[in-house]
Image: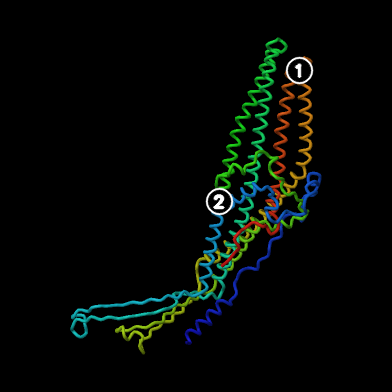
Amino acid sequence: MRKCALLFILAAACLAGCTMIPRYSRPSPPIPRQMPAGTAYDAAYQGGSAAPPVEWRNFYLDDRLQKVIELALANNRDLRVAALNIEKARNLYRIQRAELLPQVDASGSVTRENLPFFLSPTGKAVTATSYEVSAGITSWEIDFFGRIRSLKESALQQYLATWQALRSAQLSLMAEVASAYLTVGADRENLRLSQLTFEARKKTVELVRRRFEVGTSAALDLRQAETAMDSAQVDVVGYTRAVALDENALNLLVGAMVPPELLPQDLNSVAPFEDFSPGLTSEPLLSRPDILEAENQLKSLNANIGAARAAFFPRIALTTNVGTASLQLSDLFGSGSSIWAFAPQASLPIFDAGARRATLKASENDRDISIAQYEKAIQTAFRETADALAQKGTLGGQIKAQEALVGASSASYNLSSARYLKGVDTYLAVLDAQRSLYDAQQGLISLRLARLANLVTLYKVLGGGVGSGIRAPMPSF
């Protein structure tokens, strides 16, 4: 009974002891408190809601895109690996936490031995049987100086880092799926534009050929018209290939074949995303999952310093064994058959040629490296957000200018065609106007794609909103 009390006292001392982990203080963010402002950013802070939507479905408003994202969240293999890493880190934490408590093992044995007559003290051969049952603690380290608790805290922070890594992977995956989805729509729109252009140029070739046959157009005009038609045909084939590659890329991201009915026919068929105007402060960046992951990694390495410090102090281990033994099975639990052993052991480092001190210094170096990586992650987040804001602030004006260019190019083409048919101008002017219109239309599609992709990027770099509604397994032990 006294032995049990002693064990409980030692366990309480172990659990109540302190650690040698340095006091953690979050490094000051090496970025301005305010996001950039100026001509390129002014429009980015105007219009839309005041903050990114918390729930991703409130941002990605297109029903078909939502279904594609749900498929990706369920089937993407990289996301599956991230989830399995969480399970692995959780089990490693549980293993480390179990080191705080003693491991109790039970054993039983039966020994039967024979002594020949020349070894027997009685001069006769003897056959003896013995029975033993015991239970005990096998080398339990009593954590007086917090070495094991420091390692446990390090494992916990590693686990939390993997959880943040999953959230970050989910945000990135949704952004990549949305961007690939938009690219499919844009290239399908480009394909339709190239097909319409080819058909229009084919009709032009027929018109010029008839004019050539009656002598009102030169052979050069016919060849130029055929060249323009063939160029459009090249684009038709190229965009046909591009659409197929886009769909393959989307299927890989999703991790399954996307049903054809969920794919967009063009950018106009995609419901607009929820627009928002982020605040001027840079503080929300600290809540990004990748920033929180870097901070958890920093806390883990900070905890390792506590374990390295504890290595300078004695390590106390306890081994116990309590049981019973008898030569007769019927007397195994009888009076006077008990056996026990109590073996505390202490080891004190005396000389190790500086190995422990070097280990401590290496742990401190790892922490300092992690601080630099944490600060770099914040700076990268600031740059990504500033870039997205600059694009958001300028793309609107660029699209308006491009739309005006399409209108002017269309009017120029119509006027050139009319002048050519009346014999006032050469076909070269028509060809130039035609190419300018086609390039302007393609440029408008690219800018519309860039504006939608920019909203996706801005939503991602801001962490998907404070307290993102993305489903991720909460830490549980």
Q: How many marks?
A: 2
Which dot marks residue 420?
1
Quarter of the image for residue 428 reads top right
Residue 293 horizontal/vertical position (percent)? 62, 58
Image: 77 above or below 399? below
The reply, left or right, for residue 436 in relation to residue 173 is right
Around disc 1, counting alpha carbons within 10 Å, would you say few (fewer than 14), some (14 to 19), or many (20 or more)? some
Please, what is the three-letter code of the amino acid marked with disc 2? Asn
Quarter of the image for residue 33 reads bottom right
Around disc 2, counting alpha carbons within 10 Å, would you say few (fewer than 14), some (14 to 19), or many (20 or more)? some
Helix, strand or loop status at disc 2:
helix
Residue 298 horizontal/vertical position (percent)? 62, 61
Instruction: Report the quarter where the C terminus lies.
Output: bottom right
**Which residue in the protein does label 2 denote?**
75
Residue 16 horizontal/vertical position (percent)? 58, 77
Image: 284 above or below 455? below
Q: Residue furthest top?
A: 215
Judge by depth and name the residue closer to the eye, 452 or 417: 417
Please, what is the three-letter code of the amino acid marked with disc 1? Tyr
**Would residue 393 be seen by someone viewing this image from the given angle?**
yes
Image: 245 above or below 37? above
Q: What is the C-alpha distance between the residues marked 2 and 1?
A: 57 Å
